[in-house]
Image (cartoon, helix red, strand yellow):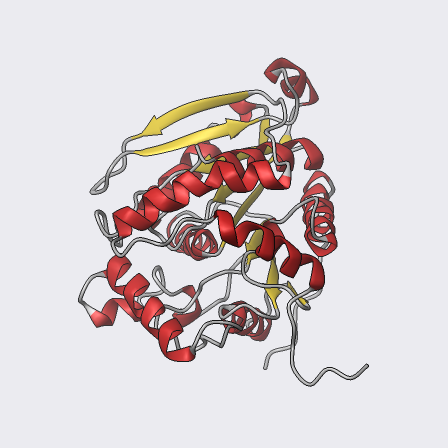
Amino acid sequence: MTYTRPRLDAFAAAVDARLKPLAPKQGKTAQARRADAEAFDPIMCRELGIEPVDVATEEHTLTVPNAPDARLRVYWPTPERAAAADAGGLPILVEFFGGGFEIAGIDWVWWDAHFRERARDAGIIVVAGEYSHAPEVRFPAQPEQCWSVFEWAAEHARELGGDPERMAIGGGSAGGNLAAATAMMNRDRASRPVRLLLLEVPLLDLTTQHLGSQPGVPRLVLRQLAKTLVRQYLGPDRALRRNPYASPLRATSFTGMPPTVIYTAELDALRGDGEAYARALGEAGVPVSCMRMIGQSHGSAGYRRAVPMSDHQHRDVVATLRTLHDAPVDYPKAASR
């Protein structure tokens, strides 16, 4: 059989068909879209059989200079924190949720289950940071909040039973944007050791110059949606779209960024962002791997237990995170380009 164009994976298409009749119509305002998505979160989790696993957790609220307070939740890999602490020196992943800067949070069933499962399966501590929604709060508050969460995790690593020399930063979609910005802020401000930057279908260029197409969404509609998202997050100042903490792909230098693993999806309009970022890091001599998931959409990696690729990506991410338990690889210096 010959395929003339990319197609959505049959398993992902089946899940989309099952969920579509259950999803509410998207509201016109950010607040309405947020309410609709929050109402759909438990429905989607029920349909996919997603339930939070039993691991120890603890919450904190941080004061952030010139920005709203930031919540965070710590997840240990075992039901008892003491059992995890006995292991000592566990790797720590500081992770940020996705949602177009306007929806989702660490209390959502899907994200909470995601953080719990990732901590348990990789045998690590996960620190999930929450940031303010746009348009009520705008850039640069969000990266400053995420930076504060990372700084707190690094400073309290040993108290948590973790190792400040085995830190990782990660995020998906808009959370990938903030993860990359946080890693860049760390490079510029503190140079704390970061062993891994993990980005999943990340949004990295708010100029939208790398925005691709997406099946089922007319290009004009996609461009308008992107324009609305950017305006909500950054406000009317178009110059901010090139600020490297808003658009990490627009940085003038990538030297000193941590080793990075990126996952993109073939049918995702953001695929170009992640792959261009991988090329930029590689050109700067940063160890980077980028995997494109064929036949997948922006959200299908979240269809655990229903889409084989989603389960495989989870296992691949867990294997990557488990390398944090090992000594880092000392690569020779890359050839200058």
**Residue 200, how many percent across, how many down?**
56, 56
Image quadrant holding the C terminus, namely bottom right
Please tell me in which quadrant of the rendered image residue 309 appears. bottom right
The single residue placed furthest to the front in the displayed view is 21
Q: Nearer the viewer, residue 201 or 156?
A: 201
Could you tell me which residue is drawn at 43 percent across and 57 percent down? 177
Image quadrant holding the N terminus, namely bottom right
Q: Is 25 left or right of 290, judged from the image as shown?
A: left
**Residue 206, how many percent across, how many down?**
36, 68
**Residue 225, how many percent across, how many down?**
34, 67
Does 47 sit above or below residue 18? above
Please tell me in which quadrant of the rendered image residue 100 appears. bottom left
Could you tell me which residue is drawn at 59 percent across and 51 percent down? 18
Q: Nearer the viewer, residue 181 or 166?
A: 181
Could you tell me which residue is drawn at 68 percent across and 68 percent down? 294
Does 164 sit above or below residue 210? above
**Residue 319, how many percent across, how many down?**
74, 46
Does 108 sit above or below residue 85? below
Could you tell me which residue is drawn at 30 percent across and 46 percent down? 133
Q: How many marks?
A: 0
Q: Is 185 left or right of 92, judged from the image as shown?
A: left
The single residue placed furthest to the left in the displayed view is 236
Q: Is residue 114 visible?
A: no
Q: Is residue 96 visible?
A: yes
